[in-house]
Amino acid sequence: MTDNSSSVFDLAPLAAASHGGNNDPRLPKPRYVGCPQNASRMPYTKYIAYDKQVPFEYPQRTWPDKKLQRAPRWCSVDLRDGNQSLVNPMDSERKLRFWNLLVSMGYKEIEVGFPSASETDYDFIRMLIERELIPDDVTIAVLTQAREHLIRKTYEALRGCKRAIVHFYNSTSVLQREVVFRKGKDGIKQLAVDAAKLCKELEAEELAGAGRGIDISYEYSPESFTGTEPAYALEVCDAVTDIIQPTPEHPMIINIPATVEMTTPNVFADQIEFLDQNLARRDSIVLSLHPHNDEGMAVAATELALLAGADRVEGCLFGNGERTGNVDLCTVGLNLLVQGIDPQIDFSNLHEVRKVVEYCNQIRLSERHPYIGNFVFTAFSGSHQDAIKKGMEARELAAAQQNADLDSFLWQVPYLPIDPKDVGGTYEAVIRVNSQSGKGGMAYLLKVNHNLDLPKRLQVEFDKVVQRYADETKREVKDEDIWRLFKDEYLPAEEAGKHAALADTDTAAGAGEGAPLGVNGQRLEQWGRYRLLGANIMSDESGSDTVIKVKIQDNGASAAGAAGAATGSAGSVRTGAKDPVVRTLSGVGNGPIAAFVNAISVLGVTVSVLDYAEHALSAGGDAVAASYVECQVGDEPETQIIWGVGIDSSITTSSLKAILSAVNRTLR
Ligand SMILES: CC(=O)SCCNC(=O)CCNC(=O)[C@H](O)C(C)(C)COP(=O)(O)OP(=O)(O)OC[C@H]1O[C@@H](n2cnc3c(N)ncnc32)[C@H](O)[C@@H]1OP(=O)(O)O
Ligand SMILES: CC(C)C(=O)C(=O)O
C-alpha cells in the first residue's frame, strides 16, 4: 500500500503519447542527406524517458567546470557485490586469495561480505577476525538489509573486530516502493530510521559488553537511488544521519548507488552535486558512489560524480558485479594515473592481478578490457603501427638528449595512452601484423626482435612480400613468419644460420627438413645462384684504388629460382641441379664496393649501387653488422632496382654479400 495514490504504471499513456520516434514532425530534421530514417521494429513506446519517471533539474551545478585532482577514498566490494553476482560464489580459499590481493594493492576499505546471508560469508569474516588477518590500516565493511534479525546477526559476526563499517541499506525508488515493499515514502524512511536506531543500540551493547569494543563506523545506502526522487533520497539520508549523529571526527558514509544505471552520467553528476550541496551534516559525511554499469557508462558516471563532490568510490576490480558489473576500480584508478594523478593503488602488476581475479571469479576478461585485455596495447593497422614506431623512437631520442631515465620519462606515444610497462606488461604485443598492416609494423618487429633497422625504401619493398603473404594466408603474420619471409627473400638460410644474433629454430640450410616454411607450411627450397665464400681486399700500388680478390660459388642457373617466390610457389623443385662451381674473381675500384662490382662483371652481371646503409647488430668482439644496398642490376632496357641485404662479422663482407643478395634476387 503506497501513501500516494498514483502508480508507476500510470505513466503508460504518457509514454505512448510522448513518443514520435525519428519521424516525429516536432523533432528537428537530422543534418545528413541521403540516409533515410525509417521507423525500426523496436518497441520503443514501451519505455519512457528517465526525466519523466523521476523529474529532476539542478541548473546551479558547477561540476562541468571542475577537474579531477586527487584520488578518492576507494572501497572494494569484490568480496560482497562481486561475489554475490557469481555463478559459483567464492569459497573461503578464493575469498582469502582475493582479500590478500586487495590488501597488497593498497585498498584500505574492503567490503568482505553479507554475514547474515550465508555461512560462507559469516565464517570468512570470523576467520579474518580470529586469525587477525586484518592489517591495522585496513577497515572491513559488512552489508546488511535494514531488517532486525539480519542486523543482529551482522553484529554477532563482528565480535572481536577492532574496527568495522556496518553498511545497511533499503530500497527507496519509486518502483521498489510500490512493487517490492508496498510502502509509501514515510514507511520506507521508517525502515531506514529503525535500522539506524537498532545499529546504535547494538553498538552501545557491544561497548558495554565484555569485549574490547569495536570502533564502528556506519554506511547507509538508499538502494536503487537512480530510480528515487533525489529530494526524497536526501530526506531519507538526513533522517538516518539524524539518528547516527556523525561528527567530523567520526563521520559516516552516505553511499549513493546507481543500483541500476538509468541516466547519462551528467544527470548522475547533477544528482550528486545536489546531495553534496544539500545533505545535512555534510562536514560529517563521506559522500560515496556505488555505480553499476547497465548502460555501459559506470566509469564516466563515476568520474563526473567525483567532479560533482563525491569523496569515495565503491566498485570491483575489472568491473565484476551484478549484471553488467560494478564500476571498474582499475579503470577509474588508471584513468587518474594517465592524468598524472597518484591513484593510491598499486597497479604495477596488473597481469598478476588479472590472474588472481580470473581465478577467484571464474570469469575471463575480455580481450578489449581497458588497460589489461590481451589486445589493448596492440595495433594491427598500418597507420597506427607507423605512428607507434615513430612515437617510441622519438621518445627514446628525447630521453637520451635530456639524459633522462627512459622508464620514468614523459609518456607521449600515439595510440598508447599508457606505457604497458607501467602495468607490468611488455612491448611484445604492441605491434602485430596482418593484412591491415603497413610497412611500419613489419619494420618494428624486425627491429625489436632481430635488431634489423631497414631503410625506408627497403621497408616498402619487403612490405609487399609480407602483404602478399598476409592476403594469401588470411591470418596474422607472426614475428617468426616475418623473419622466415625476410630470410628467404634476402638471406639464403645457410647465411642467416651462421649468426647467433639471427639464429632461430629453422636455420638449417637447404631444402627438406629444417628448411624455412612458406605459405601453407610447405618447405621453401634454398635458392640463390651466387654465394660469397671469401674476399681479400688490398690497396693497389699507388694506394689510391682498392683491389679485391673474391671467391664466389656459382650454384648454376637452375639454382637461381629454385625456391619459387617466398609467397607461395613453394614446392617448385630444383631440377637439373649441377655441382656448384667455385670461381675466383678480381677487380679494381675506388673502394671495396666498386672493386667488387667490377670483379663480378665477368659473370655478366652489371650492378650499380644507388644507396647504402649499415649498422651493427650486436656489440663486443664478435659484433655482427648488417648492410643494405639498393642496386640497379642489369643492362638497359632490362634493369631492375632492387635491394639486397648482407650480414657478416665484417662490415665490408656484409656489404659485398648485400650486393650478391640483390643480384640473386634479380635472377630468382
Ligand atoms: C543491490 C544489492 O546488491 S543489495 C544486496 C543484495 N544481496 C543479497 O541479497 C545477497 C544476500 N541475500 C540473501 O542471502 C537473502 O536475501 C537474505 C538472507 C539477506 C534474506 O533472505 P530472505 O529474507 O529469505 O529473502 P529476501 O531477501 O527475499 O527477503 C525479502 C524480504 O525482505 C525485504 N527486504 C529486502 N531488502 C530489504 C532491505 N534492504 N531492508 C529491509 N527489508 C528488505 C523485502 O521487502 C521482502 O519482504 P517481504 O518478505 O515482507 O515481502
Ligand atoms: C547495497 C547497495 C550499495 C548495492 O549494492 C547496490 O545498490 O548496488
Image: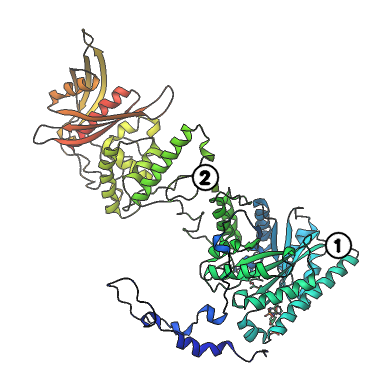
x and y percentages locating residue 192 in the rendered image: 74, 77
Q: Is any part of residue 319 visible from this angle? A: no
Could you tell whether 18 is left or right of 215 in the image?
left
Q: What residue type is labelled 1?
A: Gly
Q: Which amino acid does label 2 sit on?
A: Lys
Could you tell whether 351 is left or right of 637 in the image?
right
Residue for point 8% across, 36% down: 637
x and y percentages locating residue 97 in the rendered image: 66, 56
Q: Is residue 47 above or below residue 215?
A: below
Residue for point 47% across, 33% down: 400
Residue for point 17% across, 28% down: 608
Q: Is mark 2 on a helix, strand or loop?
A: helix
The quadrant of the picture showing ligand 1 is bottom right
Query: Of the residues under marks 1 and 2, which one precedes in the sequence?
Result: 1
Residue at image mark 1: 213
Whole-number angstrom distance, CA of label 1 to CA of label 2? 46 Å
Q: How many marks?
A: 2
Any mark on residue 421, and which?
2
